[in-house]
Image: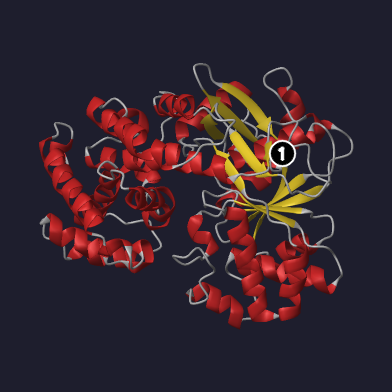
Amino acid sequence: MTLLSNNTLASLAGKLPLPAYRLAPQQPGIGIVHLGPGAFFRGHQAYYTDLALQHGGDWAISAVSMRSPDVSQALTPQDGLYTLAVLDSDTRYQVIGSVQEVLIASEQYQSVLARLSDAATRYVTLTITEKGYCLNAQGELDLQHPQIQQDLSSGQTAVTAIGLLVAALAARYAKNVAPFCVLSCDNLTDNGHKLRKALIGFAAQKAPALANWLEQQLISPCTMVDSITPATDAALRAQVAGVLGVNDNWPIKREAFVQWVIEDILPAERPAWQQAGVIYAADVSAFEKAKLRLLNAPHSTLAYIGYLLGYETVYDAMQDKTLVNLLQQMVQQEIMPSFTAPAELDIQQYSQAIFARFENPAIRHLLAQIAWDGSQKMPMRILPVIRDNLAAGRSISKLSFCLAAWFLFIRRRLAEGQPLVDPLASSLTAAASVCNGDAQHDVAQFLAIEAVFGTELPKQNTFIQAVTAAYQQLTTLVSEHPVARGVV
């Protein structure tokens, strides 16, 4: 069977929606560089840009992987084309054409730098996960991070996204080319402001004049992104091949719900993202907080407890009524009272929609995958809610189950000899290795990890007691659970 590509695209007419601009004699030029071309980007930002390109403009994407060659090897033979499967009660398909090239920074560094410093590149978007920004517990650039130190001391190939972007901005400064607008699309609170500060902070270490220029001109709006995008599997590839009649090396699947909110400070010259459904807002933080607290917090809690109870996917775990009841109590009693929602959002309706999304049988979202990088997610999703509730004298008993489940998840991975996917894996496994099953003792080992919990929160007795109680209750629940018995 032939491969999806520019040569086979026209033959798919009538089978599914196609990027008409890819069939035109004149292809759109590249105006966007994206760092981190994973599944979420291809189901989200590339999807929105595909719709925007149907309104014209030179806004095609150069997708850049910092190290992994996988996406380039899959999509380069396909001229960047791939299939998006939207999974709902009925599955629908479309070919996405917004990605025109896929580069690998570690292997094609000069090409990547040239693309980033080209005046035609007016936007840079990022999905590099929380850990890719190399921030410390205060949300600022960690100048002691080994890779940041490497990039600061070396005049050669940058290994971090921050180092790469500053190198490109320095090249633009030298050529008197305005900075590109840079958009973080990761689940990082206040992401645009933190990214801007990190870039300027890095530049200040290298060239104060560059940092001053960026302080005056760099635009980095905050954003909020949302859509559940499970990993591609062999079943999806076979499913897509059956629909298209051609092979697709790396199709993407996601749920029907998709949302992108951008702080309304973009330059006037921009892709037709608004026509594609992007929401421009004066204050993204309210949307961001609603998503982090009402979606991401229960999602992580579901992942850790569900994994401990022996479930494999989000859908599987959502069939456990006791677990779902715990999540609903956590949301209603401890999360909703913790923040003020944007006026445009009905939080009860929004929360109900989130639980309905979790129950989508067409989405096979692995709990083990959601559980990755807990040390980066807890400070964004759970700890701010706990701090707010403690300050207001509200309950944190249900929220504490997420932390307790994360600790037990780490212990489980260590006991099973499975790798822990987390930038603080060594510290976390060191804590787990000295646990003995006594809740008070075990919780103390994890709370001592300052990079996650800081110094003040672990001193609060109310917090310690709540997490210890949850740890003890969860240990008992897991040992008595009918599904989990075979795995504990």
Judging depth in this view, the residue of 378 and 167 nearest the camera is 378
Image coords of residue 82 (percent x, y): 64, 36
Q: Residue at x 74, y 21 (%)?
A: 13
In the rendered view of the protein, which quadrant contains the N terminus?
top right
Q: Is residue 241 left or right of residue 435?
A: right
Image coords of residue 12 (percent x, y): 71, 23
Q: Is residue 88 left or right of residue 474?
A: right
Judging depth in this view, the residue of 428 and 242 nearest the camera is 428
Q: Residues within 10 Å of mark 1 (few under 14, many from 20)?
A: many
Is residue 106 visible to the viewer in this orientation of the structure?
Answer: no
Q: Considering only vertical position in the picture, is 409 above or below 152?
A: above
Judging depth in this view, the residue of 353 and 417 nearest the camera is 353
**Residue type, label 1:** Thr
Q: Residue at x 40, y 23 (%)?
A: 361
**Residue denoted by label 1:** 49
Q: Is residue 424 left or right of residue 203?
A: left
- The quarter of the displayed image where residue 211 is located: bottom right
Is residue 56 visible to the viewer in this orientation of the structure?
Answer: yes
Judging depth in this view, the residue of 218 and 16 nearest the camera is 218
Q: Considering only vertical position in the picture, is 297 above or below 461?
A: above
